[in-house]
Amino acid sequence: MAQHAMTDQVGVRFGIGNGVLFLLAAVIVAGRVPGPYGVALLLVMTAVLSAVLDVPHAVGLGLAGWAFATGFAIHSLGVLTFAPWDLLRVTIFVGTAVATSQIGTPA
């Protein structure tokens, strides 16, 4: 009988991705990384981590990346806002996550 790794399950990869984004947000706050650089780091990491996800999970990871970026890189203490820039940012995070999930999907 063939052994399967836990990471073969998309839900496990999704959970790992969220954990990585959480840790990166903590590093950004602790390192006092300026807002735009923190957002860029979280966006790049969201894109990389989404490459191994399907579309529904990539949407969730994109939303999580946006929440960490808005709540910790832009604002403090996890405050989420829905100003025009925030709505643009959520669109970019989710769009990027979905796009990279399509690139990384095996044929």
Image (tube, grey):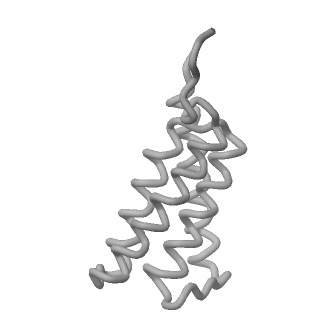
Residue at the right extreme, as displayed: 56
Please determine whether, in this image, residue 23 is positioned above or below residue 49: below
Return the x and y of residue 99 as percentages of the image width and height: 56, 40
Res 53 quadrant in image: top right
Please determine whether, in this image, residue 82 is positioned above or below residue 25: below
Q: Residue at x 66, y 43 (%)?
A: 11
Q: Residue at x 59, y 56 (%)?
A: 62
Res 12 quadrant in image: top right
Res 5 quadrant in image: top right
Residue at the front extreme, as displayed: 1
- Pick whichever, 1 or 14, lies toward us: 1
Instruction: Judge left or right: residue 76 versus residue 24.
Output: right
- Pick whichever, 65 or 15, lies toward us: 15
- Pick whichever, 49 or 83, lies toward us: 49
Q: Residue at x 43, y 79 (%)?
A: 73
- Pick whichever, 99 or 23, lies toward us: 23
Q: Where the C terminus falls, by quadrant?
A: top right
The count of marks equals: 0
Return the x and y of residue 72 as percentages of the image width and height: 48, 81
Return the x and y of residue 87 as percentages of the image width and height: 64, 72
Q: Residue at x 49, y 90 (%)?
A: 76
Instruction: Judge left or right: residue 90 versus residue 52.
Output: right
Q: Where the N terminus falls, by quadrant?
A: top right
